[in-house]
């Protein structure tokens, strides 16, 4: 059962988290592009907590008995999506770093070759 | 005696512009007495690098693709490192007419501005962009006016010029995507003066510039939030 107590707790935690994330972006410690998905998740959970009827509808739809389980299931599902997208991101970054390293090494060699040529 | 003691740089970001880059550089050749230029090749996968090499153009070849923000910022870093007094952004696809270069510099000197933006929407001449884009642009103009009380009619214009202060600011901090509206707000929040002049832009020649619904939503949300966040940053 979704008690008032847990709803208030969730809302307080969410507001603190959203403020923290926004402040990180404000201080340029976090890129807005990657913070957006977290903010989006936070807003979804916020809305659901505010309107428990929505949770009731969704949980009936999915065949989940308890509304609060539905809430956590959704939060968990969204978190998994976020983690997977970060995995894709990390993978892409590692490829870009590899390419960057190779380019730098090749350019270093080219510069050395040019400098050595001048030594003659 | 030539009274041009100012060092000016034209920053030309280019990604896969093999069909346009030669013309773009040819068009600015007549201004070479007053303006240097640098092409920022943003990891093009076509023959842009080879063409620049063959024609001995001034080019910086980025080892990986960084997007428009990263590419243009590279230009600003180059301007900063080489002590330029003015830096002007121009697209590599030929949309921007170099005839406005001297006018922008003149305006900057006369009005003592820190930034001069070439706006399509003051006289509403030339290429006016699609309706959807214009609605988005008008939203940003409204938002910027609401937050800073300054009116910028073309906040997404890529044809803009900055002085030494702007060069230093952008070399240090520049957003990776859709950088123009946010950086305009950054200039305002730092107390820098922005002046707009009417310009005429041409339609895109060669290549495609499409934007999907998903990208459009991300664009509107991201730029709106960045403008608001820029306003509340410490300056």
Image: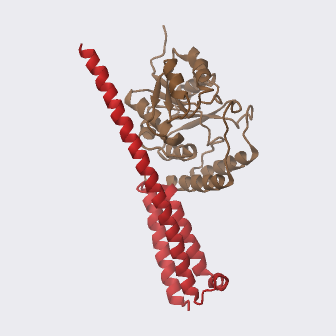
In the rendered image, the residue lying farthest to the left is: A119
Q: Residue A116: x, y in percent? A: 26, 20
Q: Residue B40: x, y in percent? A: 49, 31
Task: Give the quarter of the image for residue B45.
Answer: top right
Q: Spot the brown chain and give its letter.
A: B
* Most foreground residue, B111 or A36: A36
Q: Spot the red chain and give its letter.
A: A
* Most foreground residue, B14 or B31: B14
Q: Is residue B124 left or right of residue A75?
A: right
Q: Residue A91: x, y in percent? A: 44, 54
* Most foreground residue, B231 or B201: B201
**Residue B90 in sight here:** yes
Task: Give the quarter of the image for residue B92.
Answer: top right
Q: In the image, what residue occupies the spot 48% across and 18% down? A: B56
Q: In the image, what residue occupies the spot 43% across and 45% down? A: A96
Q: In the image, what residue occupies the spot 74% across and 31% down? A: B126
* Most foreground residue, B231 or B226: B226
Q: Is residue A44 above or below residue B5?
A: below
Q: Residue A50: x, y in percent? A: 60, 80
Q: Is residue B189 above or below residue A75?
A: above
Q: Is residue B73 above or below residue B28?
A: below
């Amino acid at each position: 059962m979704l008690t008032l107590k847990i709803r208030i707790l969730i809302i307080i935690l969410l507001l603190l988290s959203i403020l923290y994330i926004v402040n990180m972006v404000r201080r340029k410690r976090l890129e807005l592009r990657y913070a957006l998905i977290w903010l989006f998740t936070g807003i979804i959970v916020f809305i659901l907590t505010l309107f428990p009827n929505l949770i009731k509808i969704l949980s009936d739809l999915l065949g989940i008995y308890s509304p609060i389980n539905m809430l956590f299931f959704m939060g968990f599902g969204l978190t998994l999506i976020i983690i997977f997208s970060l995995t894709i991101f990390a993978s892409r970054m590692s490829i870009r770093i590899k390419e960057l390293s190779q380019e730098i090494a090749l350019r270093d060699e080219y510069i050395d070759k040019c400098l050595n040529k001048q030594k003659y | 005696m030539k009274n041009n003691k100012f060092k000016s740089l034209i920053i030309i970001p280019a990604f896969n512009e093999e069909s346009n880059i030669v013309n773009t550089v040819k068009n600015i050749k007549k201004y070479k007495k007053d303006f240097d230029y640098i092409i920022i090749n943003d990891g093009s996968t076509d023959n842009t690098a080879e063409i620049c090499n063959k024609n001995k153009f001034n080019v910086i070849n980025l080892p990986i693709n960084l997007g428009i923000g990263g590419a243009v910022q590279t230009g600003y870093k180059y301007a900063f490192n080489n002590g330029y007094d003015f830096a002007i952004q121009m697209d590599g696809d030929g949309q921007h007419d170099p005839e406005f270069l001297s006018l922008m510099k003149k305006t900057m000197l006369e009005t003592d501005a820190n930034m001069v933006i070439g706006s399509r929407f003051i006289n509403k001449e030339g290429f006016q962009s699609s309706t959807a884009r214009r609605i988005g642009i008008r939203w940003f103009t409204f938002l910027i006016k609401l937050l800073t009380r300054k009116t910028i009619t073309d906040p997404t214009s890529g044809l803009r010029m900055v002085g030494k202060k702007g060069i230093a600011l952008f070399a240090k901090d520049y957003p990776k995507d859709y950088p123009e509206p946010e950086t305009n707000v950054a200039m305002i929040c730092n107390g820098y003066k922005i002046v707009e002049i009417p310009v005429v832009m041409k339609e895109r020649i060669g290549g495609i510039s499409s934007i999907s619904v998903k990208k459009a939503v991300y664009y509107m949300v991201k730029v709106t939030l960045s403008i608001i966040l820029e306003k509340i940053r410490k300056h």
